[in-house]
Image (cartoon, helix red, strand yellow):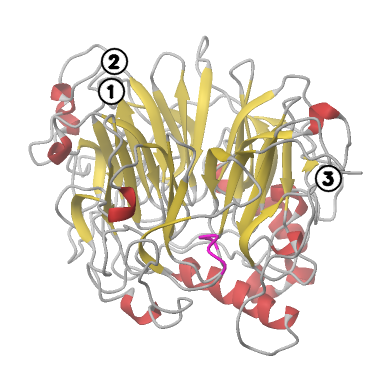
Amino acid sequence: MAGGGGGGGGGGEKKNKENSIAGDGGKKEEDVMEEEQVDESIKKARGGVGGGSSSSTGLRLSSSSSSYSVRMWGYLPAASPQRLPLLQPTPVPPAASSSTDSALKIVCNGGCGFALAISESGKLNTWGSTTDLGQCYLISGKQQEVPEPYPLQIDTPIIQAAAGWAHCAAVTGKGEVYTWGWSECVPNGKSSVDSGINASGRNTEVVVEDTSDSIQSASLLVPPWNSSDVGFVKASPSASPLNASGVPLVTSRHAMRPGHRNTAGGKVCEKVADEVPKKRRLANTEEAGPSENASAADENVFAPPCLVGFEPGVRIISVAAGGRHTLALSDGGQVWGWGYGGEGQLGLGSRLRVISTPQLIPCLGTPEGGLDQSRLVSGCFTATVPGNYIKAIACGGRHSAVITDAGALLTFGWGLYGQCGQGSTDDEMSPCHVATLVGLPVSGVAAGLWHTLCITDSGDVYACGGNQFGQLGVGGDHAEMLPRLVESPILEDETMISVASGARHSAVLTETGKMFSWGWNKYGQLGLGDSSDRDLPVQVAITDADYVSSIACGWWHTLAVVYSKVWAPTY
């Protein structure tokens, strides 16, 4: 199997397996919607005729004085003439500006149908988006075939960025964070209707789990954004819904039991405020249609770029974006979170639905250094976790992971497929140490929709979680509740230095500049020239480059910065 991979077809045969692994009903509504929208778009591009996906579009890399360039593959609809998937590494066309400082140098993780990269001059560039898949100008820039700077009206260069399903976040050289997109992901100084937080900032409802499935998402089908002016909204300060220890403040004796972990059977916690509606009141453009709900969607579903407010003196160095939540890492090694937290992905000890202002996540005990009893989860003491600060963060679809300076891996959030690596399908409400990796310091981590990958100091890769499409790279399609070593003959002599994860595919980079990928390949996101899934690592061949220097994965695509000899015409 080494070198050739193993998986099935283009993903259709394995769809039925998704609900049979690690419990029924794990695949949520928006996970199905995303695939159906893309499939319909591709079918239209082919004139309604099925069959194999298109190969590379033949986009050509122009001559440049720089020896670095970016390759893309997978599904970026506007990046190919017929809006078909790119099945093999394809040069990203030069940016609209031809200046030398417009060359792309940093590729960013995330983006659902659009890609992000940062130029030499520190401009955040986006491309690949289309409006027929529910994307809008506000999230991913104009409908683009080539990279163009996103219109952030700031003077400070962008140093790092990430995108979720329908929101983006970017870090400036001053340590500031700007974010935009889906409104529940954008701090606004006030709480959403169903967040359980009233105007005074106090938590009035905590829902553990609703087995009636009444917690719903806003529709992903969004009308095109009509305005060409993207302005800034400064998040106004508001009272925190948490106390100094990160414990939710409640107004009733019926407070949720601290550190509760969800079980596969499901439970419903007592509500504190019965009058708070359970269903979201965000505009549903799928029901009303673009013309009827355009104004409501503009106001309620998407938000323009916002300067995120942190405590005085906090300087952010990196961000990670999940399906509907965001984490930010400060230069002091602290982690902040906001957005949707219904499965515990914000690590705040409870199922707070929407947090509209950044909250400090006490990953290593209380700020005073003592043991925070509210964060005791089935014997998981964060006070015993090796390390003094957090050095890396990652967001999956509905779960999160962080690494301490001592190499300890902590996970929290949705655990239905075992993606938290705790040996069960429980949700983790607070950061919990992955104990099976004790003695194996972790240096890097990535999180997908249902799975988690990490790299140890020795260059080995471990994976856990859902494996319906082979995204763990361990062979077969069975979920792994605990981290499992990714073993393959093709990796025996390789040392991994970087890892990235898409929705259901994975990629690693070795110290010799080789790249390997595996998992879901319906849209060519593995870069192997076909649309067959792989359940073991396969090397990605980039024939026009000497080596790969960095990698990133979006939901349905992959990016790589490659080094190659400068092209010059021959006479």
- The overriding secondary structure of the stretch rendered in magenta is loop
The residue wearing badge 2 is 367
**Residue 405 in view of the camera:** yes
Q: Amino acid at mark 2?
A: Pro
Q: Nearer the viewer, mark 1 or mark 3?
A: 3
Q: CA distance from mark 2 to mark 1?
A: 7 Å
Residue 519 vertical placement versus 8 (above, below): above
| Number of numbered tags placed on the structure image | 3
Q: CA distance from mark 1 to mark 3?
A: 54 Å
Q: Amino acid at mark 1?
A: Ser
Sort mark 2 into few (<14), some (14-19) or many (20+) by Cα contacts within 10 Å. Answer: some
At numbered mark 2, what does the secondary structure look like: helix, strand or loop?
Answer: loop
Residue 245 image label: 1
Q: Residue at x 33, y 53 (%)?
A: 490
Task: Judge from the rendering whether residue 404 lies leftward or rightward of residue 136; answer left or right.
Answer: left
Residue 62 image label: 3
Q: Furthest-bottom residue in view?
A: 49
Q: Earlier in the sequence, mark 2 or mark 1?
A: 1
Magenta-highlighted residues: 525-529
Residue 388 image label: none
Q: CA distance from mark 2 to mark 3?
A: 52 Å
Provide residue 492's location: percent of width, then percent of height: 28, 47
Depth order, front residue of 457/255: 457
